[in-house]
Image (cartoon, rainbow, N blue to C red):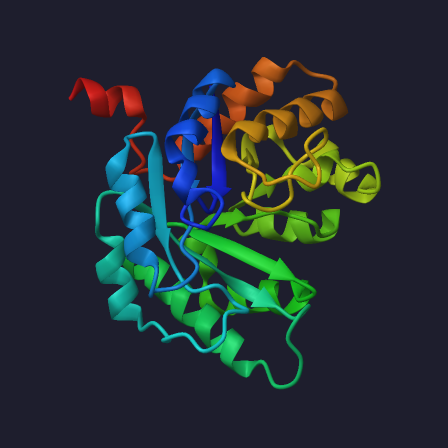
Amino acid sequence: MLVDSHCHLDFPGLAEHLPELLSRMADQGVGHALCVGVDLENFSKVLALAESDPRLFASVGLHPDYTDCREPEVEELVSLASHPRVVAIGETGLDYYRLKGDLGWQVERFRIHIRAAKAAGKPLIIHTRSAAEDTLRVMAEEGAGEAGGVMHCFTESLSVAERALDMGFHISFSGIVTFKSAQDLKAVARAVPLSRMLVETDAPYLAPVPHRGRTNEPAYVRHVAEEIARLRDISFEEVAAATTANFFSLFANAVPARKVEGA
């Protein structure tokens, strides 16, 4: 069984096709998916997905490069994260790729999420782009390791991965690792301990080879796991088993669907 540890099934292009997406997930051995929140205004949609099917989980947070959104407070995030289907805080972090100028508000938003995760006792889903040094610095200053979490859609260097691992974080690989041009990232995927690795789609974005350029979906996470198995010269089954076990260990209140259905 596989888990898509990061997707956005509430986004247009996916939300209106949920039954078909879930069917294709099952066909490809993808047993669960984590629907990640990116703003508070649409969190109810994310939560509704998680409540609608035991294979789906939710997180709550405000994406670092979303502007003109209501800023969360620690107490609000903690309250929203108390729902049993919410397994994480995020996605959060720093993104200096699209936005320029004084981005101190991003740093403060990130700090609020880290504090909320520590208070809620739930892990962080961290997004970083063109901001690795500041991301790691804020994580260290705020004691993010106390909450733990995952560096999602990882595209940074092995050094950055190792520093995140040292703080107790997991590293998640997306369809980017299947791209021919991503040779540096492939090297990171060979080096990161299998015991600290997750796989994801970030659907509807970043569809892996052989679906590159199309709308991504959780069923395609199989291609990510297959590429990692190829890179490490191990079986697909070993990658699937390890990344699934890692997911349920990290997101400790995510209950596998078979247990929910048998309750």
Label tally: 0
Above-or-below relation of 1 to 12 = above
Residue at position x 48%, y 63% in the image: 63
Q: Nearer the viewer, residue 184 or 68?
A: 68
Q: Nearer the viewer, residue 9 or 16?
A: 16
Above-or-below relation of 91 to 231 = below
Q: Nearer the viewer, residue 258 or 147?
A: 258
In the picture as drawn, the residue positioned furthest to the left comes out as 263
Q: Position of residue 40 (x, y in %)?
A: 34, 64
Residue at position x 46%, y 59% in the image: 144
Q: Position of residue 222 (x, y in %)?
A: 59, 25
Q: Position of residue 5 (x, y in %)?
A: 48, 38
Q: On the picture, is 62 further left or further right than 220?
A: left
Q: Quadrant for the C terminus, please.
A: top left
Q: On the picture, is 57 further left or further right than 160?
A: left
Visible residue check, residue 121: no
Visible residue check, residue 9: yes
Q: Position of residue 205 (x, y in %)?
A: 60, 46
Q: Nearer the viewer, residue 246 or 23?
A: 23
Residue at position x 25%, y 58% in the image: 80
| Quadrant in which residue 135 is drawn | bottom right
Above-or-below relation of 17 to 77 = above
Residue at position x 42%, y 22% in the image: 23
